[in-house]
Amino acid sequence: MADSADHHCPFAPLHPLPRLTADLPGCGGRLRVELQDFQVEEIPLYLPSGQGDHLYLWIEKVDVAAETLRRHVSRALGVSNRDIGMAGLKDRRAVTRQWLSVPRSAEDRVARIETDRIRVLDTKPHRNKLRTGHLAGNRFVLRLRDVVPDARARAEAKIAVLQAGGVPNFFGSQRMGHGGSTLAAGWALTQGAQQMTRVQTPDGTTHVLHLGDRSLRRLAASALQGEVFNRTVAERLARGIFHRVLSGDVCQKPETGGTFTTDDPAREQARLERREVVITAPMWGPKMIRPAGEAAELEAGILAAMGLTEAQFAVLGSLAEGTRRPTAIYPTDVTVQDEVAADGALSLVLSFNLPAGSFATVFVHEMAGPIAGESNDDDLDDGPASDAQPEDRQDSSLFTEPHPCD
């Protein structure tokens, strides 16, 4: 049964996300028309050594959610879900390649994993289980179909700006759930919701949430953190301070991941321009490093405007311990190619690397728009699964058995 009191989430996901390159015309187009239009390959933090009690599997999956993959491998090998290691979740509506780790004792059963949508491309032993975050980044190959005639020139102009100043490191709509349902679940958690509950979003939609599911609670807490982060970055863009270090900003050293609260904005501004440090924005929680001065005022103001408090994040406990996230990322190995179909339709193929935890759709959003005569909402068609969560849950009211993958 649902909780006796419904919860009314007072905010929806920020949409559309602002663009750093909004003053440059976009190339338009449609994303994820075909599964092959969205390809992701994990860039591992390290390669398996060839020795050890764990077996690493290099797996390709097509239109399979991350948690569906985990459950399928568990059943096929006869091992616990907890024994399967993944460095990160990958998109469902895509062709993806990534490493998984399983106990080496299951090596003779690996062939059972294969289906028409899941292939094991390689296997190799290693000493330790693969853990979340054990990846350097991801390589993307994305196809935008039906772009404008001068799409390549437009994309290249935007890429030059973004490689110089960084791409706003927004969380994509996938993190917020279909219709903002995962974000609404995060809000409900701060209000003490447990087990089955109902949450109404600002558009009047009611979502029935199974908050007894720990994986949903974890995603929901992350979505709430992510929405505050997105609005903080958006505010910096709106104020023209996306590239400016403020007094009290928490900066991070990309090489080591070390963070510190700046007491000398001019010094850190010079280091920012040399890419020796990056500015960070909040992923709220009790263990988060706090800013000071002007930066603290900015971040506290965003939180208050959303009707949230630090105490509400403390209620989330281990689901949202708190951290900092860079406000900008820098794509590498970027290439752009034209592709003309037999019927003359023009596509643009973008290839690029992004660091772990960043969203390719945000980079493509910068490429696609704005288009003269169209609204920001209409300049990128991301296909029917654009708001899918990074697993098999398409709507908060449908958290039941996953679709089978064989």
Image: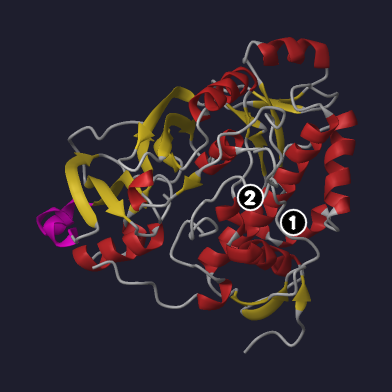
Q: Position of residue 133 (x, y in %)?
A: 46, 41
Q: Secondary structure at mark 2?
A: loop
Q: Secondary structure at mark 1?
A: helix
Number of disc labels: 2
Q: Which residue is mark 2?
A: 378
Which residue is at the front of the view, 77 or 243?
243
Q: Is residue 307 above or below residue 271?
A: below
Question: In this rendering, is residue 265 above or below 401?
Answer: above
Q: Is residue 104 magenta?
A: yes
Mark 1 crowd level (few <14, some 14–19, many ≥20, 10 Å Cα): many
Query: Which residues are drawn in magenta?
Result: 103-114
Q: Earlier in the sequence, mark 2 or mark 1?
A: 1
Q: In the image, is 83 to the left or to the right of 231?
A: left
Q: Position of residue 388 (x, y in %)?
A: 51, 60
Disc number at residue 143? none
Give amino acid for label 2.
Answer: Asp
